[in-house]
Image: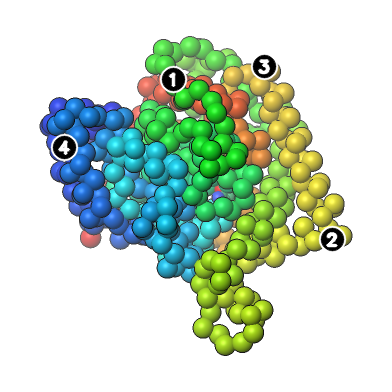
């Protein structure tokens, strides 16, 4: 086994004992980023000056004993979160020159906890995609195999964390965009309950499904990030006021819901590591309880109706006047809107806007949008029923390991099926996490754990137990030397 990379807790100990300074640590990360990130294309922008300034302040805070939970820890933000005075582009031509006038609440919360932002990470355009191939900045590559995708839409964050180019990253998850790339890149991806993290300052894709979260090298690191990010925010009307996220290190047996049918049709490459993970958890004293999720099969269709409907309204603001790219085209104002939108948005975003507008239009609203909303309720009820007899539900994170670049170019619905295990969880607003549980042909496999609303602590505790028994999360990709 390779030497485990330091956890956030270990880095904090090194910083507070002055074994290393925050400036040295930040410089070391920039050195790693400069020598490897071009192979992965995982960063959109680097904020070296402001990061080093923040690191100097962190050092003086540490010297004065003004220590906070993440003081001096280098992190990066997905390019969907506004950072005051910096570009936030959502990897779209539409927002190529947008400079955020304020910071997202979670960006502020992490800054207030002492974290140092080194830059922003690549993503699918407006977070629409499962492979990072829809980014206007070009695809990210999977650090375990450069010919394969890292997953999406938080592919840049997943690749950067997997390659240890930052200690942790933020991400957003509307239908799986934290858990699917986490699974493809062999890192921990955590999406908390809807309302736990503020969406203020996160560019909206589908507001009722959008969840901010994080990608880290371990469950414990995810817990540290989440406790710093989360909290009630009056600037987001869907933000919840709840007790802070906590977790204890004592092991206790849990009832683990096992939707047998979901595991039945998996390829061997995924089935074998998941089976092993189940045995590990059982051997540790947890009980497996078979459950059923009867509406699972219709979740992807309903998700794409609701997500596209919400996207079509959210993205109406990019018209070249209120927001976004304005075409040089000379014509009347109607033509200018059309031309700006047609130049600014990529193919996948256009496809979603058209689909969303269609399902919301008179004559189609009842048969598509209303029906999808009813299915959404049934899916949520399935989970809530299953939680009567279980503490945490287990599921695959993805139906395959990371696929090759361009493998899904022909039919977009092949890509949509990538999300089958993750979208039902967004439709229900439940907290969920993907943890690495093995490899197949050198590519990581992820196990998904799902908990009842606001029971993030169940996931953290079970995940920490699992990572104490296994070392999958400590495996690191070996990038070719260039
Ligand atoms: N892959 C899904 C989609 O394209 C989910 C994206 C996301 O979670 N942001 O809609």
Question: Does mark 1 have its CB less than 8 Å from ligand 1?
Answer: no
Residue 90 in view: yes
Q: Residue at x 60, y 40 (%)?
A: 237
Query: Tag 2: Cα neighbours inside 10 Å, few (<14), some, or many (≥20)?
Result: few
Residue 25 in view: no
- The percent position of residue 433, horizontal first and vertical second, equals 51, 34
Query: Quick one: label 4 or label 3, which is nearer the N terminus?
Result: 4
- The percent position of residue 154, horizontal first and vertical second, equals 47, 50
Q: Is disc 4 placed on a helix, strand or loop?
A: helix
Who is closer to the viewer here, 446 or 337? 337
The residue to which callout 4 is attached is: 60
Q: Residue at x 45, y 47 (%)?
A: 104
The residue to which callout 1 is attached is: 247
- The percent position of residue 37, horizontal first and vertical second, equals 30, 56
Establish if 370 lies above or below 340.
above
Most extreme residue toward the front, as rendered?
234
Question: Does mark 2 have its CB less than 8 Å from ligand 1?
Answer: no
In this rendering, the label closer to the viewer, 2 or 3: 2
Give the quarter of the figure containing the N terminus.
Answer: top left
Marks 1 and 3, how far apart at CA:
22 Å
């Amino acid at each position: 086994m390779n030497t485990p990379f330091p956890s956030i807790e270990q880095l904090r100990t090194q910083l507070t004992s002055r074994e290393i300074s925050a400036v040295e640590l930040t410089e070391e990360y920039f050195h790693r980023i400069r020598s490897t990130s071009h192979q992965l294309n995982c960063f959109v922008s680097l904020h070296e000056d402001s990061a080093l300034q923040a690191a100097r302040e962190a050092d003086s805070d540490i010297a004065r004993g003004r220590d906070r939970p993440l003081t001096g820890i280098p992190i990066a933000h997905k390019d969907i979160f506004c950072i005051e005075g910096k570009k936030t582009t959502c990897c779209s031509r539409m927002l190529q020159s947008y400079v955020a006038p304020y910071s997202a609440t979670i960006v502020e919360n992490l800054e207030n906890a002492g974290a140092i932002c080194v830059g922003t990470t690549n993503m699918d355009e407006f977070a629409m995609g499962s492979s990072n191939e829809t980014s206007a900045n070009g695809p990210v590559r999977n650090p375990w195999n450069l010919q394969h995708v890292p997953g999406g839409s938080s592919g840049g964050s997943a690749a950067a964390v997997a390659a240890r180019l930052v200690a942790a990253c933020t991400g957003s998850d509307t239908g799986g965009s934290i858990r699917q790339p986490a699974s493809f890149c062999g890192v921990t991806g955590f999406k908390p309950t809807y309302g736990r993290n503020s969406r203020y300052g996160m560019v909206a894709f589908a507001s009722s499904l959008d969840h901010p979260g994080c990608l880290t090298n371990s469950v414990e690191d995810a817990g540290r990030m989440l406790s710093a990010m989360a909290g009630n925010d009056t600037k987001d009307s869907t933000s919840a006021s709840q007790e802070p996220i906590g977790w204890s290190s004592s092991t206790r047996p849990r009832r683990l819901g096992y939707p047998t049918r979901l595991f039945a049709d998996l390829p061997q490459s995924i089935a074998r590591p998941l089976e092993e993970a189940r045995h590990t958890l059982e051997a540790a004293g947890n009980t497996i309880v078979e459950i059923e999720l009867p509406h699972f099969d219709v979740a992807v269709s309903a998700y794409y109706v609701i997500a596209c409907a919400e996207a079509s309204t959210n993205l109406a603001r990019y018209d070249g006047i209120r927001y976004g790219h304005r075409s040089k085209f000379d014509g009347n104002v109607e033509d200018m809107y059309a031309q700006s939108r047609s130049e600014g948005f990529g193919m996948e975003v256009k496809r979603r806007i058209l689909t969303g507008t269609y399902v919301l239009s008179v004559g189609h609203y009842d048969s598509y949008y209303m029906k999808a909303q009813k299915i959404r309720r049934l899916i949520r009820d399935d989970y809530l029923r299953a939680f009567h007899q279980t503490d945490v539900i287990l599921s695959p994170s993805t139906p395959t390991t990371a696929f090759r670049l361009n493998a899904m170019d022909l039919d977009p619905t092949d890509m949509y099926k990538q999300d089958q295990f993750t979208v039902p969880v967004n439709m229900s607003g439940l907290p969920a996490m993907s943890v690495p549980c093995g490899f197949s042909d050198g590519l990581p496999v992820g196990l998904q754990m799902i908990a009842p609303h606001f029971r993030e602590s169940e996931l953290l505790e079970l995940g920490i137990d699992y990572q104490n028994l296994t070392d999958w999360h400590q495996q690191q990709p070996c990038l070719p030397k260039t």
